[in-house]
Image: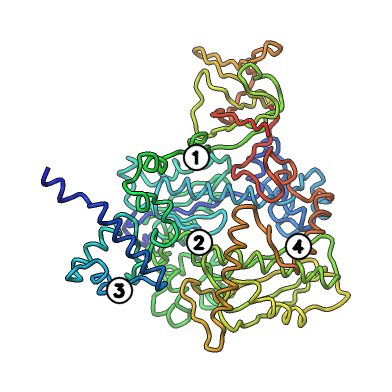
Amino acid sequence: MTSQPLTVHNWSRAILHLDVDAFFTSCEQAVHPELRGKPVVTGLERGIVAAASYEAKARGVERGMMIPQVRRVCPDAIILPSDYETYSLFSLRLFAVLRRFSPEVEEYSIDEAFVDLTGLRREYCGSYELIARKINATVTGELGIPVSIGVSLTKVLAKIASKWNKPNGLTAIPGREIHLYLAELPLEKIWGIGSNTAALLRKLGVRTALAYARCSEGFLAKHLAKPHLQVWHELNGRSAHPIITESKSSYQTISKTRTFTPPSHDESFVFAQLSRNLEDACIKARRHQLAARRLVAMLRTQEFRDAAIELKLNRPSAYPADLFRFLREGFAQIYRPNVPYRSSGVVLAGLVSARNLQYSLFENATQVEKVGRIYQAVDELRERYGKHTVQHGSSLLTQQRAQHESERGDVPQRKTNLLPGENRKQRVGIPVLDIEV
Amino acid sequence: MKDMKKGTIDHTKVQSRVATLKQFYQRKGRMPSFSEMAQLFRLRSKGAVAKVVDQMEKQGVLRRDSTGRLIPRSVNHSLRVLGAVEAGFPSPAEEEIADTLSLDDLLIENREATFLLRVSGDSMNDAGILPGDMVLVDRGRTPESGDIVVAEVDGQWTMKYLRKRGESVTLVPANARYKPIRPQRELKIAGVVTGVVRKYK
């Protein structure tokens, strides 16, 4: 049974999955070449590990670990504040490079992409594996970051392939060889199968990915839900998850969180953080012409205890002025005095297109339009002079702390070591190499 | 010549019609319907209006939204950009300006592979690269002899001219106070310098 292929078609489709190895720290090593081969950790400003280089992982550093603990397990670790601006630039470049090879690119996350290569063999005069090799060479050559690539017939299989041999891996799984890769693969390693589903499957006598792939459709339909059935199709080489090429226009939710160091129990300061989260989230929503129907406010205490509240808005909006009323209400319910808080967050949910919004019956349409015009002006000012040129008074307190941050050395080098003409808010959109020549 | 005339667009007529549309839009705050346009343009059928609208769409004066309704593109505010509509036949100067390069386009050939680097040393002074300058480094280019490259030589970073002669590779400075470098163990070229930016003010 194990020798029987799952499908006789080798390449009915060719889907590539690419994943940057240790993305944040790899970006750091790309712009600071002297950090290559060394244990590097990012997340200094948050006090916990956001990313660890392979060298750091080998020394026992894990994601989410507290920084003092990192210093204990790996005393020579280079611990850096996160430089999200640079990471975003690398991310944009990554997707741009992939689009040179195929127009069908799905930006799955900041450092992960799916690319549909079907039919491109003729164009590149070679196998899909060869195209994957070219992609690998281009990304590592031009961007200087290591990637792991998997190519197979479906997204689920491509993801298994890219994880097969990390870091710097390249694995191609043609249809006739799928069963060889699934034979020993634990169920949890399949994209879309969680630990609960895996436990249930084991109770039903299904123990490996291959056994799962060989289940009958009727059996799965009886015990599992539709998404798991789609995974089953994908494992058998039949595509059920299309490549979504729209570049990040359909956000299901938009969230913005901030950790402030040191923690604070100052009520107005904590609210200012939340207010800034809301402003940031709304900026992103407006950029994608979306409006939220629900708002979630979250606070996290120094002891990592979370409190959150979800609020329903009277109408979809991406204007903080409309939302502050709800935010204050929610804040009053979750905030407890004299408790030190370490981070805050806002989630905009129930997103709808902001292009043709309906006003509710009892609303003053001119008033709503007026608010819209104000934010249009705010957005224009932002584009011209940088983020938060104009901001809400309730967010002002966050800036005092920002100055403290730079004194503590928690701000990435890129933001302190400015090029001529740059300022604190706006820098050139090109990664800067930190090399002494 | 007759055939040519058939395909070309009568610009003065289009202009006057755009002006009419503009007036209507400013007065009523909306676009006219096809039958209203027939009246405005003194056309007898909506089919004729459709042709005119098509023409305007091609010229970029009008746009349609996803439901097929008309959106003014230049009628309302960006008339100045089109210039042509207000000031008669487009002047050659206005036509040309649309095809200019930004400084970015001029300096950067391969956007994804280009990095900035601030120069600290003076070993390339005579090549016109001074301490404090920003150089653009292209990681995607194959370095050729004569290129200025950023390279790691035996564990040390440097920026020099690359000289290849047969099998031998030398890194040559542009400053008499420095000596050419012959890599002993290893030479890794990070990228080719494609431009220098110096900002005085």
Crowd rating for badge 3 (residues with CA inside 10 Å; few <14, some 14–19, many 20+): few
Q: How far apart are marks 3 and 1 (CA)?
A: 40 Å
Give the SS element for disc 2: loop
The disc labelled 4 sits on which kind of residue? Thr
The disc labelled 3 sits on which kind of residue? Ser
| Residue with the most extreme top position | B176
Q: Which mark is residue A248?
A: 2
Residue B142 position (above or below residue A70): above
Q: Residue A259 carries which label?
A: 4
The mark lying in front, picked from 3 and 2, is: 3
Of marks 2 and 4, which one's residue comes earlier in the chain? 2
Nearest the eye: A382 or B93: B93
Q: Does any portion of residue B27 appear in the rendered image?
A: yes
Q: Which mark is residue B33?
A: 3
The mark lying in front, picked from 3 and 1, is: 3
The answer to whether the residue labelled 3 contacts the one labelled 2, judged by CB atoms less than 8 Å apart, is no
The mark lying in front, picked from 3 and 4, is: 3
Give a yes or no on whether discs 3 and 2 share a subunit.
Answer: no
Residue A402 position in % (x across, y down): 79, 56
Q: Distance between the residues labelled 2 and 4?
A: 25 Å
The residue that label 1 is drawn on is B102
Give a yes or no on whether discs 1 and 4 share a subunit.
Answer: no
Give the SS element for disc 1: loop
Nearest the eye: A50 or B90: B90
Q: In the visual, does A275 lie left or right of A230?
A: right
Q: In which quarter of the image is residue B117?
A: top right
Give the SS element for disc 3: loop
Crowd rating for badge 2 (residues with CA inside 10 Å; few <14, some 14–19, many 20+): few
Residue A211 position in % (x across, y down): 46, 68
